Amino acid sequence: MCGIVGLFLKNSTLEPRFGELLGEMLVVMTGRGPDSAGFAVYGSGENGRIKLTVRGDDLDSIVADLGGDISGFIRDTHLVLTLPERDEQRVRDWLAASRPDLAVTGAGERIELYKEVGLPADVAKRFGLAGMSGTHGIGHTRMATESAVTTAGAHPFSTGTDQCLVHNGSLSNHRSLRRMLEPKGIRFSTDNDSEVAAGYLSWKLQEGATLAEALEASLDDLDGFFTFVVGTESGFAVLRDPVSCKPAVMAETDDYVAFGSEYRALAGLPGIQNARVFEPEPARVYAWERN
Amino acid sequence: MPVVDLAETTKRDLNAQLHALPADTNATHWTVENSEGQHALAVGLDVPITVEINGHAGYYCAGMNKQATVVVDGNVGVGVAENMLSGKVHVKGDASQSAGATAHGGLLVIDGDASARCGISMKGVDIVVKGSIGAMSAFMAQSGNLVVLGDAGDALGDSIYEARLYVRGTVKSLGADCIEKELRDEHKADLRRLLDAAGLDETVSVADFRRYGSARGLYNFHVDNSSAY
């Protein structure tokens, strides 16, 4: 089943409330996915510096252990490191060698990506989602049907800088896609089919496609059921498979674009009474870019 | 007349109150506030009452309806009036997928658009959509009428049996075994009846519609058709 949500703000005065709004949307989707939850938020960033979100235990000493021009803060089981772009590979190498128990969930100038097992309300609270500001972001509530309830299987997935994806559905050709993508340098950290969809889009973006073009191409190359909500540093997009197997509803006002698996998730948004509420058409890419 | 505020009363309480009504109830007009897209509102009704929902409704609104009139002043989610037997369901906004699925009778009127699979496996219901309908609508539709003032998406009437489809706008494509058929006087009369029932006056002319239905080529298995099944 699973529930997915997304919010893209057009009006910057709502940015301080971003986490609160996304959190409410996420919690309403508990019925569709009570096992685990995750979300990605595009918050503040600094040119030339990159944020790495690292998940695991015993995070206290990492900033000191890494040394150099690196800062960090801990939110529950996640540590967000901020470091000069040129240090990214060194830090990744150090983490892989010294702390193989940790996983990097997201990387980018502005993205922070949190996921954990548990009820969405508890997950949102543990990470302090309500207090986060941001411009856009996505979230997922998981009802595990095909694989174990683990944090690694929770969405969103991020396979490229400042990119993230949530998926409702299942892909049937993810094995062959993975074999095609790995030699092209796309790294996967789980066996999850949705991570392959994220990797596919990362590859297309790397090849120079726009987000909309990458999604357009996925209609030819991905086999299965999907509703995707995707974020990049400046973009936000939605795509449903040609059979529109999984539910989706969207709302647009002058202030925001919002996505939910069900309308209930949107019901608490400001000004929803006068929003243009619509159901995205099958096999049609909906994309928004920040100016 | 009762007003139920779903900000204070649970959906289960609302449905329980409606189910408890005797056939000769005097509480014939109910208003529901703050629906907020909740699922399964006003389902399984079996009394001649009117329920007005002021706001959006979620999945399966007015499902299994019998006798009652349910009016939604908003959009509805998947499966509005699913398996309706009689009565009327009127959606003033848009409907999500599978509107009127498997419904045996009654009238479903949608003022806006209906998305994919509208009237899937319909078994006698009359559906009037004032906007457009999505792909795969009237899939395996068995009987009843589907009237669309706007356009129809891909694969209209795939594997259709005896339901009648009337579309005023364009049809993106017809599904397997669905063909355009002549709009004869008997169909025009029936169409007029349906338009009237949906509150549409003579400014909507029956002559502007085209009729689609079954070519009856897939009724019995024939090996030459194996790719179409």
Image (spheres, rainbow, N blue to C red):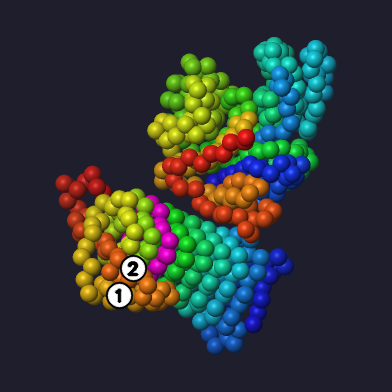
- For the point 64% across and 82% down, the residue is B1
In the image, which residues are magenta?
Answer: B125-142
Residue type highlighted by circle 1:
Asp
Instruction: Pick the residue in front: B37 or B48.
Output: B37
Percent from the top left, x then y, of residue A177?
45, 26
Q: Secondary structure at mark 2?
A: strand
What element does badge 1 sit on?
helix
Subunit ID for the residue under disc 1? B
Residue drawn at (33%, 51%) of the image = B172
Instruction: Find residue A251 and report its horizontal and vertical position in percent.
Output: 59, 51
> Dot 2 corresponds to which residue?
B145
Instruction: Give the amino acid type for the residue marked by disc 2 in the picture.
Output: Asn
Badge 1 is on which residue? B190
Relative horizontal placement of residue B15, taking residue B124 as reference (left or right): right
Number of numbered labels in the structure image: 2
- Tell me where residue A121 appears, x and y as whole percent: 72, 46
The one of A8 and A176 positioned closer to us in this rendering? A8
Can residue A148 be seen from the camera position used here? no
B182 within the magenta span: no
Q: Residue at x 68, y 38 (%)?
A: A135
Q: Earlier in the sequence, mark 2 or mark 1?
A: 2
Please indicate whether residue A208 sits to the left or right of residue B224 in the image: right
